[in-house]
Image (cartoon, grey):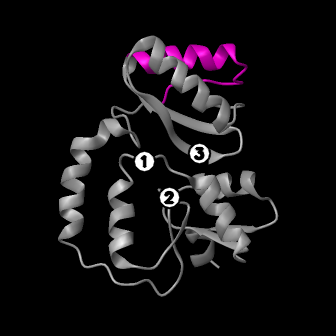
Amino acid sequence: MIGLDTEQLDSICADARESAGGYLGIANDNCPGQVVISGDESALAVGMEMAKEAGAKRAIRLEISIAAHSPLMGDAAVSFRRALEACTINAPQVAFVANATAGPLADPDQIREALGRQLTSPVRWTESVQWMIKQGANRFIEVGPGEVLTGLVRRIDRSVERLTADAVLSG
């Protein structure tokens, strides 16, 4: 959804859940004015119409086959949590900000728990980036292909430096 904030979409999702009878909620708070919702097909269709009626500039259905970052991923989350239990997680040497909490975690058990919530909890990217900036972060480097995250950081705060790993590695 483009052009509506999280409060507006929270309300729309609640209305769509009541109207359609299925789950619908915020999946990703990408940046101010760009929020992704996720849920049951029927509730999603109703929510998209409600968002358009509420003034969304764009309501685009993403081509994914799962209800990512929603309680509907509960079964997959159980398997993922079992896999996490088999992993050794050490205390981080730099701040670890979990998207599920939008705040720092240092305890390995808390990190494991937050990672386990990733499949069923909204991605709080805007809050996560804002927290890092408040702590003094002024350079963000996107690791991996593309520039999606650096673009979102630009929309959150234009004053911070944004680079991709490709740009850093190529000099």
Tell which circle, 3 or 2, labels the residue nearer the N-terminal end: 3
Judge left or right: residue 159 versus residue 115.
Answer: right
Tell which circle, 1 or 2, labels the residue nearer the N-terminal end: 2
Location of the N terminus (image quadrant):
top right
- Segment tinted magenta in the rendering: 42-62
Q: How much space separates mark 1 and mark 2, taking CA atoms?
A: 9 Å
Q: Position of residue 34 (x, y in %)?
A: 65, 39
Q: What's under tag 2, amino acid-wise?
A: Asn
Judge left or right: residue 34 versus residue 91.
Answer: right
Q: Which residue is mark 1?
A: 121
Q: How many marks?
A: 3
State yes or no: residue 54 in magenta.
yes
Please indicate, yes or no, whether residue 134 appears anywhere in the rendered image.
yes
Please indicate, yes or no, whether residue 60 appears anywhere in the rendered image.
no
Q: Which residue is mark 2?
A: 99
The residue sitting at 50% across, 14% down in the picture is 46
Tell which circle, 3 or 1, labels the residue nearer the N-terminal end: 3
The residue sitting at 59% across, 52% down in the picture is 148
